[in-house]
Amino acid sequence: MKPSRKSRGPRAGSIVRVEGLSYGDLDEHLGYVLRRAQLAGFDAFHRATENIDITPARYTAFTIIGANPGLTQSALGAALGTARSGAMTVVNWMEKRGLVERRHRPDDGRSWGLYLTRRGESRLRGLNHRVRAYDAAFAARLAPGELATLKKLLDKLSG
């Protein structure tokens, strides 16, 4: 029987506090604090998607395609911050699972648009429900005003 996540300790890559250990001035480094928060957020995502073959990058692409029917692979790559070939890898993964399909774009016969299949729409709704629930539990550590301020400040840092 596979041990539970709790009995295995923190997820690989997480940065947990070790009692009695000095962290020097790390907490004064914005990048370090952001990375710890990012890993905690990823841990919430991984708990939400446990036993589901999805990664944060795939989920992001899945969500963007769902919100933008007909999106080109190039535009998806730009939104993901990756090359068109990187977007193609993710789209191929989703297409093999029957979640996304490529269709000729009506405005440009040489270009293909990305669309969720019915199965993809259903799967994305289920994933969104699970991810939102875990995200809300993760964010509940903050008061609503703090959460809004944090999101605004992170957006500002993101450029």
Image (spheres, helix red, strand yellow):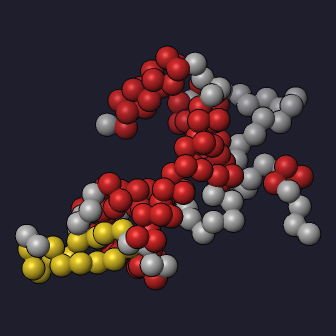
Q: Please give left or right for residue 110 compared with residue 53 in the image.
A: left
Q: Please give left or right for residue 112 compared with residue 46 in the image.
A: left
Q: How many marks?
A: 0
Residue at the image point whose x is 55% and y is 36% from the top: 34
Q: Nearer the viewer, residue 67 or 9?
A: 67
Residue 89 visible somewhere in the drawing:
no
Residue 19 visible somewhere in the drawing:
yes
Quadrant including the C terminus? top left
Residue at the image point whose x is 71% and y is 28% from the top: 24
Q: Nearer the viewer, residue 13 or 80?
A: 80
Quarter of the view holding residue 23: top right
Q: Position of residue 124 (x, y in %)?
A: 47, 60
Q: Position of residue 6 (x, y in %)?
A: 85, 49
Q: Please give left or right for residue 12 compared with residue 97 in the image.
A: right
Residue at the image point whose x is 89% and y is 61% from the top: 3
The vertical placement of 42 against 107, above or below, is: above
Q: Please give left or right for residue 61 compared with residue 35 in the image.
A: left
The vertical placement of 52 against 81, above or below, is: below
Q: Nearer the viewer, residue 9 or 111?
A: 111
Quarter of the view holding residue 22: top right
Residue at the image point whose x is 45% and y is 23% from the top: 148
Quarter of the view holding residue 68: bottom left
Q: Position of residue 113 (x, y in %)?
A: 23, 71
Quadrant including the N terminus? bottom right
